Image (spheres, coloured by chain):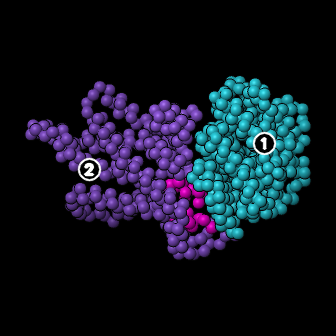
Amino acid sequence: MSTKIKIKYKKKEIWLGFWLVLPAMLAIFITAFFPLLKTFWDSFFSFGLRPGILKRFIGFDNYVRLFHDARFMTSLWNTLIFTLISVTLEFILGLATALILNAKFALRGLVRAAILIPWAVPTSVSSQMWKWMYNDQYGIVAQILYKLGWLAPGTPILSEKWSSMMAIIAVDVWKTAPFMALLLLAGLQTIPSELYEAARIDGASGWKQFTKITLPILSPTIAVALIFRTLDALRVFDIFYIMNKSVETLAVYNRHILMDRAFTGAWFGYGSAISVVIFLIISIFAIIYMRSLNLKFE
Amino acid sequence: MSVKITMAAGAVGKELEVLMNQIKMFNKIYPDIEVQLLPMPNSSTARHDLYVTYLGAMTSDPDILMIDVIWPAEFAPFVEDLTNDYDYFELDKFLPGTVKSGTVQGRIVAIPWFTDAGLLYYRKDLLKKYGYDVPQTWEELKKVAADIASKEKINGMLFQLNQYEGLVCDVAEFVHSYGADFLDANGKVIIGDPDNHARLVKALTMLKSFIDDGVAPKGVLTYMEEETRRPFQNGESVFLRNWPYVWSLANDPKQSKIAGKIGVAPLPKGDIEGGRHSATLGGWMLAINRYSSAAEKDAAKKFIKFLTSYDQQLYKAINAGQNPTRKAVYSDPKLKEAAPFMVELYNVFINAEPRPITPLYTEVSDSIQRHIHDFLLGKVDIEKALKDLESELKMITGQ
């Protein structure tokens, strides 16, 4: 627990503080809270952007409809599967990479910088690049899979749902495992080397050192890294939209509702309801992670 | 008094260069109208999303919108009614199909700028080598493609059947060529009508058999335009269904392996009584933002009239390879020299068939895309695909 420090401020200083904080508060309100509240508010109405469509209050109807919408349920399911598999793989690979990069070897600085390249390429660019590599006619990845006999020659990787999902997850892992590694590496570097020396003197095995020293001290960093990645994965859009938009995630389906149908009917409230659901799911995950993070500190 | 207008337009490669030159020529006649270009993304869907944002927010910019032929009905409430300007724009001299796609419930809301139609590209050299004529029916095309493909060890035919707007274009050509349709001219869903239903089944089964029999690679289910143009111009396919833009690229010896060996023909017809050659009408139109000021609207009209004039359409056709919408341009000897196929295939362009004109088009199209793509993938059989599509289209259109 942090100790409470009481400092007496002069009235003038309080006002100065208020005026200094005000612009930031206003900016946050306008860019974050207002759109959020407006989206909540809109989700209780039926309306569209086409002139002549009246805005009608319909309570929770949009939410009830959502759970009868097979397309929404599929996109929810797709999002959860993607998040679960990609974050798990990224964590395992990221941790392994971080452990390797934490050891001393020649050209370590160069390797540390080099692994970040996939992360530095904009997602839309790398998605398009991988889409070409998966192409059945001239894609190198597809040709290798055909040659290895893992896929029947000519099978398009990005047409079936499951092969698309796996291909997209592979790209996401390729792209973000380095980011995970970097976060975890920062955590690893805070562990004092004396701890390992003492453990070695006491005769602890490498595995024991890992489970008894590395993991416990690293756990807050792990939690932060997992929060980042999970929240990112839950609102995934670009990689699916570019590589195969027929496998819909929540964000891809929401784009369809808000953009393709903006002028066709009273869909805007429905789209807002989807946004709210995405917000709620992310909040649930965030709360779960925060809780487990707090427990570690106590 | 000088006016400044903004125009949202495609701005990729040659298209931008040509438009910039046209603005310079325009300013020689109207020095007091300044035209500013707002370059739009290459993808049609991305452009649509941007327009939704502009128009939904009712901003006065951009003043001129370059819109796809399938959007006028959807954007009609947001753009200027040009019905009274029919004579000003000389619309009686335009290809009637293109004018029709800019007409929504009797009101003209967009002026045709350039047009597009689905075409059959073929390898002249290979057809000659094996002694075939250009196929007239899909059945014939399949046989010829399969035979040459197996002997040359290349693909037979390439389509654009990714789940996107292009799938609707390719599918519409098959469906129309068998004398069938999803919606009738009044927007009524006619999938269940017995005769039409039988034709739909024949058309779509035929399309799927191209993939199942290996005449078209399975990958066509993931291809858009460019993924089919590249293999074709690398000499890896006998036939290709694509738009006119392919002609100049595939005939450019700098990037194409088959320059000079290409023929263009109308797409085949269905092997059925009442079958016809059909090409889906594509292309882009110009519309004026309803929320612009009167002076801006006036200047915008002048610029649109200029861009769609005879001389400018000819200039654009020769330099950007985009098809004119004025009938008379097709008999210009300069065009015949630069793009002979445009002149030879005049009948294809004049008869190109529009996709359904409905404000609900994006929803209708999305529904067709998903159900037909599932059928072509083999996820559902034809009866189920059509039944699901029928009930969904009825729900969307409120029938």
User: In this rendering, would A134 be left or right of A198?
Assistant: right
Please tell me the numbered disc located at residue A127.
Answer: none
Query: Which residue is under mark 2?
Result: A219
Whether B129 is drawn above or below B65: the answer is above
Colour that chain A carries in the picture: purple
- The residue tagged with tag 2: helix, strand or loop? helix
Towards the viewer: B361 or A197: B361
Whether B126 is drawn above or below B374: the answer is above
Magenta segment includes A268: yes
User: In this rendering, would A171 be left or right of B243?
Assistant: left
Q: Quadrant of the C terminus of chain B?
A: bottom right
Disc number lying in front (2 or 1): 1
Labels 2 and 1 touching (C-beta < 8 A): no
How far is mark 2 from mark 1, CA to CA?
Answer: 67 Å
Q: Position of residue A69 (x, y in %)?
A: 54, 65
Give the residue at x 90% y 41%.
B328
- The residue tagged with tag 1: helix, strand or loop? loop
Span colored in magenta:
A248-273
Whether A214 is drawn above or below B368: the answer is above
Towards the viewer: A136 or A129: A136
Colour that chain B carries in the picture: cyan
Query: Which residue is under mark 1?
Result: B137
Question: Is residue B70 visible in this depiction of the protein?
Answer: no
User: In this rendering, would B146 be left or right of B133?
Assistant: left
Type of residue at label 1?
Thr
